[in-house]
Image (cartoon, rainbow, N blue to C red):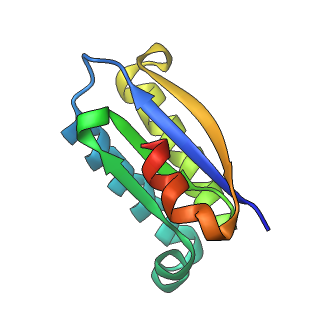
């Protein structure tokens, strides 16, 4: 089974600290919908400030919801031209490497 990984890359003017705070706000919003335990079990995400990237595993309902909420939040906060979104497919055995490489 393949994992659906979504990579966000941010342009230079975007504060990566603010992007990370926005990601955490998106996670909190999704916890309100699915419950904290579901998000803790199903969601996977990371920020790599040096590469100006954020990676979210969108292979679960919770992960897809985080992607949707995060995309909406960063679009409003930074503008839709301030970031790019790319999908990265990864098999479970290569998931960790794919997440690291996606960043």
In the image, taking residue 94 as reference, residue 52 lies left or right, namely: left
Residue pictured at 29% horizontal, 46% vertical: 20
Identity of the residue drawn at 30% across and 39% down: 19
Q: Quadrant of residue 83?
A: top left
The quadrant the N terminus occupies is: bottom right
Q: Is residue 67 above or below residue 76?
A: below
Name of the residue lying farthest toward the right: 1
Q: Quadrant of residue 79?
A: top left
Q: Quadrant of the C terminus?
A: top left
Front residue (pair 31, 90) = 90
Total numbered labels:
0
Up the image or down, 59 lies above or below 93; here it is: above
What residue sits 43% from the left and 27% below the top? 76
| Left or right relative to 89: residue 5 | left
The residue located at (52%, 82%) in the rendering is 41
The percent position of residue 98, horizontal first and vertical second, equals 54, 53
80 lies left or right of 3: left
Question: Could you say which is closer to the camera, residue 42 or residue 68?
Answer: 42
Tell me residue 94's x, y (percent).
60, 63
The answer to whether residue 85 is above or below residue 13 is below
Q: Position of residue 68 (x, y in %)?
A: 60, 46
């Amino acid at each position: 089974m393949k994992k659906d990984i979504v990579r966000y890359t941010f342009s230079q003017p975007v504060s990566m600290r603010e992007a990370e705070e926005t990601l955490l706000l998106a996670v909190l919003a999704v916890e309100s919908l699915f419950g904290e335990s579901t998000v803790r079990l199903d969601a996977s995400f990371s920020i790599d400030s040096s590469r100006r990237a954020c990676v979210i595993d969108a292979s679960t309902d919770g992960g897809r919801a985080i992607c949707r909420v995060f995309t909406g939040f960063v679009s409003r906060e930074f503008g839709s031209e301030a970031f790019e979104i790319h999908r990265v497919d990864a098999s479970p055995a290569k998931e960790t490497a794919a997440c690291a490489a996606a960043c």
